[in-house]
Structures are given as C-alpha cells and as structure tokens.
Image (cartoon, helix red, strand yellow):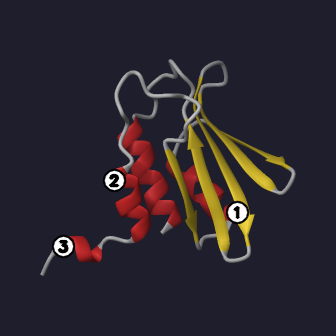
Amino acid sequence: MNKLCFLTPAVIFLAACGASGPTRDASQPIVYFASQRAPSYVAACLEDRLSRVRSSSVGGATELAVGSDSNTAYFVTLTPTTVGSVIKVMRPANAPDDPPEPEMRFDIARCTT
C-alpha cells in the first residue's frame, strides 16, 4: 500500500511548501493552512516543543515569536475559526536558522494534526 495514503493533508501541505532557496520572499508565509486544533492547543504544544517562544494576543488571534528576543526566527499567527484555527508562519528576511526550518515545520505538523 502506498505510504503517502497515511499522510494527513496538513503534513502533505507542509512537505510541499519547501523553502524556495536563499531568495525566498519574506512577505510570503512559509506555512499557511487550516487545522481542526484550537489556537490554544497549538500554542501550548509549540511552547512545549520549542525553546524561546513568546506568546501574545492581538485581537482574537494568538501570536507566537520563536527565537531569541533580539532576533526572532519565526512569527506564528493562530487565528481561531469555527472548526479550529488558521496557522500562518512567517520568517523574516535574514532571520537566524534557530530552530532550523525542517524542525519548525515538523513541530507545526505535530501540533496541528
């Protein structure tokens, strides 16, 4: 049986959205999809899996800054929906690779599926 059949749509999406190289446009999200998990669940899960996560609320959304205080590597926005949340991950231009992008994508996949 094809092992791909066992992957959830979120994991397939994360795998398909690989970085486009060093000229990646920082204005485009590196991850953007919907999950059936609530924003509070996703935020708590990411805080448990990653070091240096700072959480804040903006309107109805939860925002996570991942990385050092002086040089954030990723910004994660968790927007609630009626059936879960929308997850958007941005990576600023010239951001440090801490955590590395594959690890970040793996942790997001684990926390949202």
The amino acid sitting under disc 3 is: Lys
Position of residue 81 measured from the top left corner of the image (x, y, whole percent):
72, 69
Element assignment for label 3? helix
The amino acid sitting under disc 2 is: Ala
Extreme-bottom residue of the structure: 1
Confirm or deny contact between disc 2 and disc 3 (CB under 8 A).
Answer: no
Seen from the viewer's position, the closer of residues 28 and 103 is 28
For label 2, the residue is 15
Q: Is residue 64 above or below residue 68?
A: below
**Image quadrant of residue 84?**
bottom right
Tag of residue 40: 1
Position of residue 37 measured from the top left corner of the image (x, y, whole percent):
60, 70
Quadrant containing the N terminus in the rendered view = bottom left
> Which residue lies at the image location 50% right of the left edge and 50% below the top edge?
49
Tag of residue 3: 3
How far apart, in angstroms, are the residues tagged by discs 2 and 3? Answer: 14 Å
Position of residue 20 measured from the top left corner of the image (x, y, whole percent):
36, 33
Element assignment for label 1? helix
How far apart, in angstroms, are the residues tagged by discs 1 and 2? Answer: 24 Å
Extreme-left residue of the structure: 1
